[in-house]
Amino acid sequence: GNLDAFQLRPGIDDLLRKLRQPPGLALGALNCSWERLEQEGVAEFEGGGQEKPKPGEHLPAQESSYRLPTDIAWDSKGNTYITDGYVNSRVAKYDANGDWVMSWGSKGTGPGQFRLPHAIAIDANDNIYVGDRTNRRIQVFDHDGKLLREIRIDNQTTPVPPGLMPWMGNLPDMNGPVNTQKPGAPWTICISPGPTQYLYTSDAFPGRIYKLTLDGKLVGSSSSSGGSGSGCIDRVQRA
């Protein structure tokens, strides 16, 4: 691909220094553009570093701003999907021209609702996989936001090794209401290419990477988790 945007040519180095706590960056397949997420929205740049209008500026008035977006992905037709994220709890969709199409989701625990949609990926059939982290599940939608299925990992995994501690803070209360640090809460999602695709995701505790079929069957997981030794994983923030 064209990596010119990552060579710090005049103007781009200043641009990178202006970013404020961006949780992610992604490369678009069209026009060699690259995008990064900020607390208030998504900024898109051409290969030469020229900033384009923020998608959030085209949102309908009743949905006038992003609130801590978390991830971004594109389908085969060039449509953009953004998980918007820590506050709004929705998925926003734009067409290949950057025009607003729709959004779906609200804060909650029911089907199609989110409690921190933290990651997003799209398979070869343009199905949308959303890591609903605080609900400890992955929800799968079609390109129009129709819920197709729910994937859970916590009921398929092996027990956490005794004495293992999380990368940060106290051991999570497995019976408590906070799910972010519990096993199987998806922090990341990616889908492999090729004729047989697999879904990969990770959790913060015990710090495993999971391989699943697209219908949600667990194929395998990393055997070493937690800690800081060779082969151990503390946390995967972005796939």
Image (cartoon, helix red, strand yellow):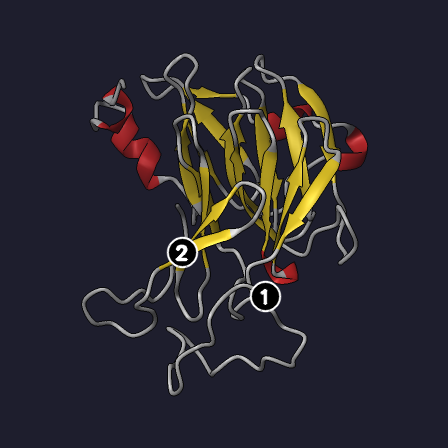
Q: Which residue is mark 1?
A: 155
Mark positioned earlier in the residue sequence (2 or 1):
1
Residue in the picture at 31% in, 64% down: 233
Where 167 sits versus 192, above or below? below
**Quarter of the rendering containing residue 179:** bottom right
Tag 2: residue type? Gly
Q: Distance between the Cα atoms at labels 2 and 1? A: 14 Å
Residue in the picture at 74% in, 43% down: 105
Q: Nearer the viewer, residue 201 or 78?
A: 201
| Image coordinates for residue 21, horizontal then vertical, percent | 43, 49
| Image coordinates for residue 239, horizontal then vertical, percent | 39, 45
Q: Which residue is mark 2?
A: 220
Q: Nearer the viewer, residue 227 or 35?
A: 227
Tag 1: residue type? Asn
Q: Nearer the viewer, residue 168 or 20?
A: 168
Q: Nearer the viewer, residue 152 or 75?
A: 152
Residue in the picture at 32% in, 40% down: 17
Is residue 124 rendered to the left or right of residue 232?
right
| Image coordinates for residue 235, horizontal then vertical, percent | 38, 62
Circle 1 residues within 10 Å: few <14, some 14–19, many ≥20: few
Circle 2 residues within 10 Å: few <14, some 14–19, many ≥20: some
Residue most toward the bottom? 163
Q: Quadrant of the N terminus?
A: top left
Is residue 93 rendered to the left or right of residue 192?
right
